[in-house]
Image (cartoon, rainbow, N blue to C red):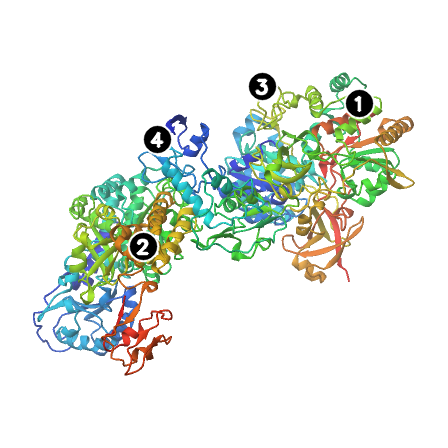
Amino acid sequence: MITVKINGFEVKVEKDTTILEAANKIGIKIPTFCHDPRLRPHGSCRICTVEVKGGRNLPTACTTPVFEGMEVETESEGVVEARKEILDLLLANHPLDCLTCQQAGRCALQDLCFQYDVKESSYGGAKKEFEIDNSNPFYYSDQNKCILCGKCVYVCSQLQCTDAIGFAERGFPTHIATPFNQGLEESTCVSCGNCVSVCPVGALVPKSKEKFRYWETSPVRTTCSYCGVGCQMDLLVKDNKIVEIQPAMGPSNEGLLCVKGKFAYNFIGHPDRLKAPLIRKNGKLEEGTWEEAYELISSKIAEAKETLGPNSVAGLSSARCTTEENYLLQKLMRAVVGTNNVDHCARL
Amino acid sequence: MTNSIREVKKADAIFLTGSNTTENHPVIGAQIKQALKKGTKLIVADPREIELAKYADVFLKIKPGTSIALSNAMMNVIIEEGLQDKEYINEKTENFEETAKLVEGYTPEKVAEVCGVDPEDIRRAARIYAQAERGSIVYCMGITQHHNGTENVMSLSNLALLTGNLGREGTGVNPLRGQNNVQGACDMGALPNVYPGYQPVTKAEVVEKFEKAWGVDLSKEVGLTIPEIMHGAEHGDIKVLYIMGENPMVSDPDTAHVEKALKKTFLVVQDIFLTETAELADVVLPAAAFAEKDGTFVNSERRVQKIRKAVNAPGVAKADWVILMELMNKLGYNKEYNNPSEIFEEIRMVTPQYAGITYDRIDAVGIQWPCPTEDHPGTKILHQERCGRGVGLFMPVSYSPSGELSDEEYPLVMTTGRVLYQYHTRTMTGKTEGLNQKAPESYVEIHPKLAEELGINDGERVKVASRRGAIETKAKITDIVSEKVVFIPFHWAEGAANVLTNGSVLDKYSKIPELKVCGVKIEKLA
Amino acid sequence: MKSIQDLDRIRQKSLEKVNLRRNVEDANVEAEASGEGLTDGKPKDVLVCGGTGCTSSGCQKIINKMEIQLEKHQLKKEVKLIKTGCFGLCEAGPIVIVHPEGAFYSRIKEKDVEEIVEEHLLKGKVVTHLLFKGAIDGDQVKPIDEVDFYKKQQRVALRNCGLISPEDIEEYIAFDGYKALSKVLTEMTPEEAIDEVKKSGLRGRGGGGFPTGLKWEFTAKAEGDQKYVACNADEGDPGAFMDRSVLEGDPHAIVEAMAIAGYAVGADMGYVYIRAEYPIAVARLQIAIEDARKFGLLGKSIFGTDFNFDMEIRLGAGAFVCGEETALINSIEGKRGMPRPRPPFPAHKGIWDKPTLLNNVETYANIPQIILNGAEWYSSIGTEKSKGTKVFALGGKINNTGLLEIPMGTTLREVIYEVGGGIPNGKAFKAVQTGGPSGGCIPADHLDAAIDYDNLISLGSMMGSGGMIVMDEDNCMVDIARFFLDFTVDESCGKCTPCREGTKRMLEILERITEGEGEEADLNKLESLAKTIKNTSLCGLGQTAPNPVLSTLHYFRHEYEAHVKDKKCPAGVCQGLLQYLVIPEACKKCGICANKCPVNCIDGVKGKEVYVIRQADCIKCGACMAACPFKAIKKG
């Protein structure tokens, strides 16, 4: 174990721990844009810059391992000055359209400019001018808002392993692009949206059907209902509506989702949903009450049992329903109807 | 899965067969690719050159339905070259000799002809898997949906036993579950032969236990499987069919036959949409979607995870568990549950694997069964100390050709599967525009040579016919498939692949239909 | 190569090939005529520089012509024509040297070839009017190594450049080539080899100045089943060509050194990362690698030991940042050339995350000499903390533009005035910029500073890879800073915020200043922004990019102030601040200026009225001033 002092507080951590991890351990928050613990540390944004006693310059907390006796200041005058300068520089090349930006409220640039009182940039000069790529059906890529933290590129290459996007050009004109700038729809992008989920600003945003602000939503942690991977995710809910889905760090998905888990939630509040029991009358399905429906079903079951016995009734359970519901259906068939005629589509 | 999902990243070699992982389990597909970036070796055996085949160290483009031959040939090579884990075999398995004898006849040269691959590739694949410190077998429906699906699985587990690739991190025999809660449905005994926890309905003490728990007398007679139920319905033996959250009109083989059967019975369908199946129902019950209720799903790695209510169900729709409970009550079985956690409490009382799992314990992170007691952490890896039954049993299995071989009238082999942008019968995904834009309609993959022979151009309408029916669909010319093999994803009701598939040939153990192989012919439509 | 004896045998056999170049004879002793053929009776080696500089000034034509002439005079047996690497004095190219006299012909044209052949080769008479002007003193011909440009030099890294044919492994062997490798493999343990390098005091010549021996030791001690050695030949500083010259002139030195390094750190594979813009260097290195393989100096069981080593070339696409070691490693791996954070250092996680030793070309070029002559010899050269010699590419306002190698500790003044021959046209020296585009500008006050790593840093500059650009009174230091920053802004990889965004904003401020729109507050803004960029950038490129601005602000703040306060460019360079004015008293009303003006902004009446320039329309092209026969137009 290595002992380090951060802002005067001692903390003991394992060898190879970074300053950021050590600070997190004792609840000291160091701001980041480009850090993601799942990625190989890349140290692009430099906002997590800290002061190390005796050090030559200001190292980044996310990439610098601790050493015995290290003394770190995370909010010293020099650090704050540097962070303000970095924010100033980022802001100089970023549209100030927070009023209408979908990301407002979830934007790390907005939050940090607020924290460090950077109201506007002190620089004029060149600004990027890119066309918005809206060719993908699920999300926009607005490079004018990109702060080049690189997370989207690294998530795509290191975690999703699709390598659909990368950095194009260099220096000031650097931007995220698909090969030959052909646009997302022509690329190998599989629309998993994992880049969208990690974008700290409004450069990659879902094509949302709803108007909402993130502060109006509340997250509900749940398990994805598509395939058997069991990805964990948060449903963002506003006014009894799911407005977005964010991946969570579940043991099987580690913060990843696929196109269906991330974007295909439209069915939940879809107008075609069944809203009332339907009962076939004169060959046509017509709305009825629960009581009517239960009455009819129970009489048919009773009739079948009476004429051909309980084995003339069968139930198909569902791999789509909960464990509890599967339990109840087989219990219904076995304990109430009296048959083992229960199956489900595991085979299909 | 014997092992956990993230362990694919720890494997030194992965033998992937019958799974188009990047499309059907995309998040696992991504993790396999992460492993490859770190140097894990990959063997892919599949009738189609799926995305992962491009990254494979060895890709075996096998003919549909020849998996057992391939596994046996790989075993042949491993034994021939002395690459088997002798210590593991001696200490932890039985029936090795018989299996070794059986696979003697499966030389790479012979099997290469059966599978349509290069014998050297079989050797290379066998060596890679056998020589890996940690070898993981990953498979899916491409293995199971055959007349000999169960034996296919046995042949894969033989491979794992032979090389000692079980019970350790990064190893195992790992089926990927296609649906969110197939595992849970099976665990809960939504099967005709077992109660929750895979306790046989035929075993007296089990029946006694459930009779006591539920306070009723129970049948000791094994029930009917889906194909048998359909058959029964068609012949008037099933009077009432209660279907919860399934759409056999699209998902089951030979839909013409399914329709006939469903029309003959009193059909109750409980679902969130008016599916093709619900349209045939006598009573349709509106259910809540997963985001509208509490409960648990069990994923492929046996992890019991929570789902939570986020929004209200539309109209008077109710959660499935509420409907089932109310119907039970209506039928005279008086049991009230206030919430799913009370059902779960009952489940863990009767299901030994779940005994130690509580809602509180899985609030933040799910637990993998078996979890016998409340202080048990759950089980990441099965068969660690020893196999579940004591010692691992080699099950020598022979290759037998698929039930429906192509003949002169139906000269092509059709196999089915799924695409990334749709899910199952599209009840859910069909509602998202972007997905329909990405994958709008049914199509059939045809090899360029075959297309040329038949005079078919890319994108043209074609008729595909089998002994059971015919569909119209769009031609997609691609060399992903072999010359004599065509592929149709089954999601769409228009141009539905399952009009063609064969529901009459079933696996003798699991009764799984032979969905992955059927004989078809193709003609160009004017 | 099975043994040292094999190597000795080849060396003995090859010695005669190079004998004439080993013993230089006095050219002033009149040769005696001796009948037919070669009249002075002595064979000659004619060396023609085939470096990039002389190639572009037409050396191939000279070689072709020489071939024809030798054929014509039937001299092919006695005269060997050798295309060598760079002699260093590129200013004077194309260069031809004739041995054994060491006669130094400069700026040779095709038409001069005949005379050299007929007079010098045939009759033994040095053609004095074609000699480099510094190679003749009165009527005394000075051999090349006594020419001023070379006199103060000590060539260690460049020792074979311009002396041997880089495409002939036997010539390299004749000059003790691969002897160091044989010594290391058969007489030294890896630890001893590292120790020798450590004791020599050699520091990285690529810019960082990190002790080379330590780097070797770290890599040797790092754990890994596979290790690599790599050579950074991605020389990107504008005007710098130290590494190119070594690779063009003496590629085997790099092959040998890398094999030695491989043995020392436990690597069996080497990569040379070289920019594709160096086609001659790439071709010669490729030949060297292939010949070394043929001679068994690369491959399995070198010198009969169990040491295996092979190497490959990786071509860079010209990104400056790929000279940064971690970006270079990314590029070798086929990834975009962007730096990685350090730690982990390449010694622990380099190419493919394996321990990797990365040195630059010049560093490697010193290695065989250190091994052969010993650490003590090497550390006797130079200053206390900077041992050995350093190669510099001298350019800018200097008479002897070219490549030179001097012992550490030589003063800037000696380099500029003695080796470099001073400032042309009698202009006054203003500053010298060292260390490439990220170096600082050192003013005249510090001309007597001895060149070593630490002195240069304390003067606000750095050693860098060895660029040295001289500026005279006509250079505007604000404009110079803008020029260098323009380069780094273009070459920033775009990864980290301060470098990508910050250098761009600095450049914009400098552009404003040079255009006359600067404010006083801009100077403070420049300084504070420069500080953040230095302190927070990810790699050396960003951390040093503000240096030219900071050092000029420090030493030449008055020039900046003149730009922002008085709206004047003292050197008269910044066009936005310039005015061309007609001096009424001097104007002869001839009207030539008005005729020359491309925008017709000079008014006057020929013979009657003094001409006046309409400042609002003037585009400051200077045509009027150049045209005025009476020097009646001034700029200010």
Single out the mark in the foreground, 1 or 4: 4
Percent coordinates x, y for residue C58 in the rendering:
29, 71
Amino acid type at image mark 4: Met
Q: Is residue C127 visible?
A: no
The residue to which callout 3 is attached is B375
Given residues C105 and B159, the one toward you in this image is C105
The residue to which callout 2 is attached is C437
For the residues tagged 3 and 2, is the chain the same? Answer: no
B284 over A143 or under it: above or below: above
The residue to which callout 4 is attached is A70
Percent coordinates x, y for residue B271 in the rendering:
77, 37
Amino acid type at image mark 1: Ala
Cα distance between the residues tagged 3 and 2: 65 Å
Given residues A266 and A79, the one toward you in this image is A79
Percent coordinates x, y for residue C91 in the rendering:
23, 66
Helix, strand, or loop for circle 2?
Answer: helix
Single out the mark in the foreground, 3 or 2: 2
Nearest to N terminus: mark 1 or mark 4 = 4
The residue to which callout 1 is attached is A335
